Structures are given as structure tokens and as C-alpha cells.
Image (cartoon, grey):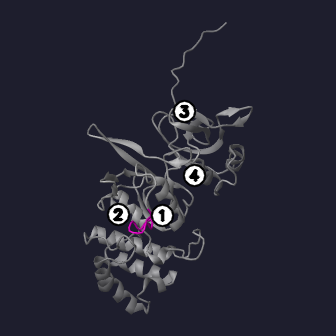
Amino acid sequence: MGKMTVSDGTAIPGGTYKVKFAGFSSREDGKPIAKQTDKGLKIYMDLKIVDGQMAGEMVPASTDLEGTASWCMLFSGKQPVSKNLADIEVQMQTDKVVDMAVTDKGWAKGPMLPKGTYMAKFAQFAKREDGKPVLGEGEYKNEKYEKVFWQFEVVAGAHQGINAPASCPYPVKVKNGALELSSKSNFYAWCVACGVDFGATPDFADMKNTLPELEEVIQSRGRVLVIQVGDSGWVESGQGAVVAAPDAMRPVGAPVEEKAADKVGDLYIAIRKICEEQKLGDPFNKDGSLSDVGKKFAGEHVGPICVAHGIPRAFTKMSDDQAETVKNELLAKFGKAEPVESAF
């Protein structure tokens, strides 16, 4: 005989743990399945803590069907080789151990990008029904508004393949039988950064929701971008949070996995950070070219370094070693003992 104890079902305490992928937890006939919820199809999985006092305990996690790509990239280092969940599960069952943040409710936060600057490309508009992007709903001061959810895929560096989510209001209005879009909106700026020329777009078939047609246009451009990710793992708000990558950072005519431009990219990041800290303004235009601030900065600070070392002044003509030299001298000149951290 024995007494019955009652558990309060306390979850794993919030914090950061080293975990391995243990498998998908929603199953039918021994196979992983997507579970229908009021928020759409969900994939549930278990992550096993591998060290410390909680070693051996399981941490639950969830994602939607599209989010499995980021999870697969995190544990296997590759995009899913199949759309079948059983195949993805096998691919993810590696020995890789990762640091995973866990909420106070005991759920893993997921493959969230650390705060930083990343090279990325537009993946798709994230909120979808029947495979097509749809508008979401936001609320501000008790007033509801239409909202757009984005996904950007990192294309270089240690976090390559991980998606960064983003959102912004949908500012498109129908007036007098025509579509009107504010040029001061994040939505407009991000679309332009992605390569949309609104002066050349065809008439939209659905005036209530232009996202499906815009998605096709953006994906056809394949533009490489520079995105700013905040503490939450989401792309920051503001027009400058998503900009076209400068030409020197774009793997033109080559797969996006090519990383030859990383050192030049680091130089661009250093210049942007220095200009921000010196309150000079943004050195780059939305199309990635040097702004007036950038031209002045380059003339006053980059040019003399290039002359002293016999380095070409054009960023696109610099070798990796030359770009590294210019970056390090700029950092030393502006009193930075530590190099600017790069997410690439």
C-alpha cells in the first residue's frame, strides 16, 4: 500500500539549457503528424536537456508546418530534404547540442536569431490560408488594423537557413477605385528594399489583399537584404530595419550560400554602426548605395586609409584582407577596442 502524491505539474523552470532534438511528439500509428489547432496546423516536438540538474528532462516545443525548416536547419545544418515529417524527423535526429531558451511556462522559444545584423532574403509572407498569404489583425489603443507578417531567411553565416519573423501594418487603402499606398510606411520601404517597383507593377486582381501577387513579385527578384533583428528575435520596426544589401555584399551571379563578400560586408556594418554612434545619420540609401552621409564619411575617413595602404577606394574592388584592414583602422580611429560583431 502507498499514499498517492499529487503533482502540481510544474514545468521546466525558465532559463537557457543545452538540448538535443528528441523527436516530434504528435503521432499517429507511430508517425509524426501535424495537429489542427484554433491557430492552424501545429507540429509538436520534445527537446532533451543534456546536462545540469535537469539532465534527461524533456522540454516541449511547437511550430507551424513552415517553421520546421528553421528547426531542421538548427539541428541538421541543412534545409529539409523532404516535405514528409517522418523524413524531417530522421534528418533532425543528430548529436548536435544547442543552447535553447525556455519560457517561464516551460516551453522552448525555438530557433530564435540572436540580436544582430544579418544578410537575408525574403522567404514569404507568413500568415497563410490554403497556401496563400493573408492579412492578419493587429490592435492599437483598442482600435484594430490590418497587419502583414513576413519571413526573412538568413543566407550567410552561422545562422544560415534560420528564418527571422517580422510584422508591420498594412497601409494599402482603396480610394476611388484605386489602390493607395503610403510611401512613409514600413510596408512600402520593405517592399522597395525587396525589389518592388510600384510604378511598374501590373493591376492587382484582388484589391482587398495584394499579398499573393506581391509575394510572387518579391520572390522573383531574389534580392539580398540586410536586416536588423532585435532582442525578441523579430526584425525590428522602422523603414531601415530591412534594406537592400550593398552591391559588395550581394553574391551576384552565384548561389546565395557564397560567402566571399563577408569581409566587405563587415566593413559596411562597421561604417553603419560608427555613423549611428556618431549621430551622423544613415550612410546608406534604401537601395544599398552610399547616401550623402556615407559619401562624406567615406571621403573623410575611408579614403585616407585607402591611400595610406594602397587600397582601392571602391568597396567592390577591395579584397577581404583590404576590407579587414580598413575596418580595423576605422574601429581604432573611433575608439573601439573590440571589433564590431558580425552576424555573418
Q: Nearer the viewer, mark 2 or mark 1?
A: 2
Q: Report which residue position mark 3 lands on.
A: 37
Viewer-proximal residue, 319 or 206?
Answer: 206
User: Which is more foreground, mark 4 or mark 1?
Assistant: 4
Disc 4 vs disc 2: Cβ atoms closer than 8 Å? no
Compare residues 301 and 36 and report the one nearer the observer. Answer: 36
Task: Provide the secondary structure element on which disc 1 rests.
Answer: loop
User: Label 4 to label 1, Cα distance in Å?
Assistant: 17 Å
Count residues near mark 4 (Cα–Cα under 10 Å), then give few for <14, some for 14-19, many for 20+.
many
Give yes or no for contact between labels 1 and 3 (Cβ–Cβ under 8 Å). Answer: no
Three-letter residue code for mark 1 = Ala
* Main secondary-structure element of the magenta-colored stretch: loop
Q: Which residue is the site of mark 2?
A: 240
Q: Looking at the image, which is closer to me, 16 or 245?
A: 245
Which contiguous range is marked in magenta? Answer: 194-202
The residue that disc 4 covers is 70
Determine which of the numbered discs, if any, sits on residue 117 in the image: none
Asked if residue 316 is positioned above or below residue 84 in the image, the reply reads below
In this figure, which residue is indicated by the disc labeled 1? 343
Q: Position of residue 19 (x, y in %)?
A: 59, 44
2 or 3: tag closer to the N-terminus: 3
- Choose the circle earlier in sequence order: 3 or 4: 3
Q: Residue at x 71, y 43 (%)?
A: 86
Q: Is residue 167 at least partly visible in the picture?
A: yes
Image position of 238 (left or right of 126): left
Identified at 46% across, 77% down, the residue is 247
Looking at the image, is mark 1 or mark 3 earlier in the sequence?
3
